[in-house]
């Protein structure tokens, strides 16, 4: 136990020094300047979760999309201004939602300690709280991120797409210092939330020249998705939950992959190398193993560096 803790501590420390050459993160960053920050943020997320159970999924995905573009610098929270379209308005981000949760947390924190806590830290902490509220693990989040001053819709093309194969996924993650284990563990975020038909429709209609349906998808699952997402539909909001227990953080996602019942090519592709397949199998058989790996990988992803200032308003640069 003590050894495990030491290994986790050392690996986290190592990661932080690798990933945060600019802003060194630390667990007690706000100890003197805003000691109640974490409590205030946790209370806000809890309150919003009570009235909308989709909040955790939204916040988790928002944090991931933030970290993958320019590091975890809250660039995803900036509003478009004039002709400059921000990340928020880039195609993969139009389905992000619940930005008001971060606004409310920021307002509450500003009332206690103005100008101290970055929006990037608020988002990282809210993502941790969101996982915990959904029945997942909790962990100490290193803090001290700064908010960025640049956000470009055009850069959202750098986010991994649901059509990605395993080598494209590997490349996308390794460019950000994340391993294959991180890829498999973090993809488990798909235990929460909802997907629109547009994100997986390519797999169930006219997949390729020889198959209407992606052969890596179970035929009965494809049939049920076809009834939700017919070829021609005007229902823009049609779609389905990522897994049947979509508001609970559990390991169902991995069990579904093994049954060929995952939504995206990028999910199913995790079976395409022996290493990632072994991890999917391991996480499918143990929620504890998944939770432990998820926490490690979240700390790594959340530590991708970026940002220069502490914004006053999360939607605008100072
Ligand atoms: C590995 C590459 C990934 C790809 C290609 C991918 C792609 C997608 C897509 C296409 C959606 C559905 C969007 C929609 O139709 O509205 C989605 C939803 C979601 N993703 Fe990912 N994702 C990836 C990794 C991650 C990671 C690393 C996390 C978090 C750790 C994550 C968390 C989520 C969550 C929680 C949702 C549901 C959002 C909601 O219900 O509001 N994803 N993802």
Image (spheres, helix red, strand yellow):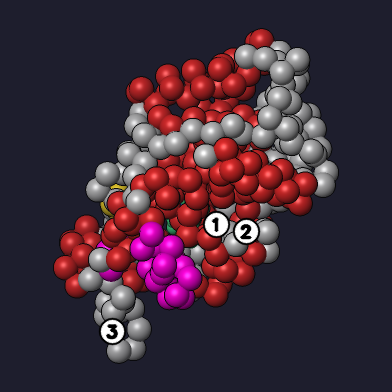
**Residue 294 visible in the current orientation:** yes
> Dots 3 and 2: beta carbons under 8 Å?
no
Task: Identify the disc placed on residue 53.
Answer: none
Vertical position of residue 218 compared to residue 49: above or below: below
Q: Distance between the residues labelled 3 and 2?
A: 34 Å
Mark 1 → mark 2, Cα distance in angstroms: 6 Å
Q: Where is residue 27 in the image (x, y as percent from the top left)?
A: 68, 30
Q: Work out whether residue 218 or residue 311 is closer to the camera in this orientation and state it.
A: 218
Q: What stretch is highlighted in magenta?
A: 260-282
- Do residues under tags 1 and 2 come within 8 Å of each other at their CB atoms? yes
| In this rendering, position of residue 221 left or right of residue 72 | left
Mark 1 sits near ligand 1, with its Cβ under 8 Å away: no
Task: Kindly identify the residue that appears in the image at 33 percent across and 71 percent down.
Answer: 203
Taking depth in this image into account, of 288 and 157 the one nearest to the observer is: 288
Label annotation for residue 211:
3
Disc assigned to residue 178: 2
Q: Distance of mark 1 from mark 3, alpha carbons?
A: 32 Å
Mark 3 or 2: in front is 2
Among the two numbered marks 3 and 2 on one chain, the one whose residue lies closer to the N terminus: 2
Question: Which residue shows up at 57% across the image and 68% down it?
Answer: 170
Callout 1 secondary element: helix
96 displayed left or right of 258 = right
Q: Mark 1 points at which residue?
A: 182
The response on whether ligand 1 sits within 8 Å of label 3 is no
Q: Is 242 above or below relative to 22?
A: below
């Amino acid at each position: 136990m003590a050894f495990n803790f030491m290994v986790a501590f050392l690996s986290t420390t190592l990661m932080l020094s690798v990933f945060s050459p600019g802003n060194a993160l630390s667990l007690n960053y706000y100890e003197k300047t805003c000691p109640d920050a974490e409590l205030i943020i946790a209370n806000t997320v809890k309150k919003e979760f009570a009235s909308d159970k989709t909040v955790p999924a939204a916040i988790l995905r928002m944090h991931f999309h933030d970290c993958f573009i320019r590091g975890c610098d809250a660039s995803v929270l900036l509003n478009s201004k004039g002709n400059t379209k921000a990340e928020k308005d880039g195609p993969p981000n139009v389905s992000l939602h619940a930005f008001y949760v971060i606004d409310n947390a920021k307002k509450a924190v500003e009332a206690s300690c103005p100008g101290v806590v970055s929006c990037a830290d608020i988002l990282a902490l809210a993502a941790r709280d969101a996982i915990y509220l959904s029945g997942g693990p909790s962990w100490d989040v290193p803090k001290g991120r700064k908010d960025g001053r640049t956000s470009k819709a055009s850069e959202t093309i750098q986010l991994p797409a649901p059509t990605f194969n395993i080598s494209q996924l590997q490349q996308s993650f390794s460019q950000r210092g994340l391993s294959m284990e991180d890829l498999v563990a973090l993809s488990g975020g798909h235990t929460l939330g909802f997907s629109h038909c547009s994100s997986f429709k390519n797999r169930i209609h006219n997949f390729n020249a020889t198959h209407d349906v992606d052969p890596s998808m179970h035929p009965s699952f494809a049939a049920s998705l076809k009834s939700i997402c017919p070829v021609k539909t005007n229902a823009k909001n049609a779609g389905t939950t990522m897994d049947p227990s979509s508001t609970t953080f559990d390991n169902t996602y991995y069990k579904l992959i093994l049954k060929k019942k995952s939504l995206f090519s990028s999910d199913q592709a995790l079976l395409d190398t022996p290493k990632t397949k072994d991890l999917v199998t391991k996480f499918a058989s143990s929620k504890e193993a998944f939770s432990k790996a998820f926490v490690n990988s979240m700390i790594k992803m959340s530590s991708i560096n970026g940002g220069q200032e502490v914004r006053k308003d999360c939607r605008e640069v100072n």
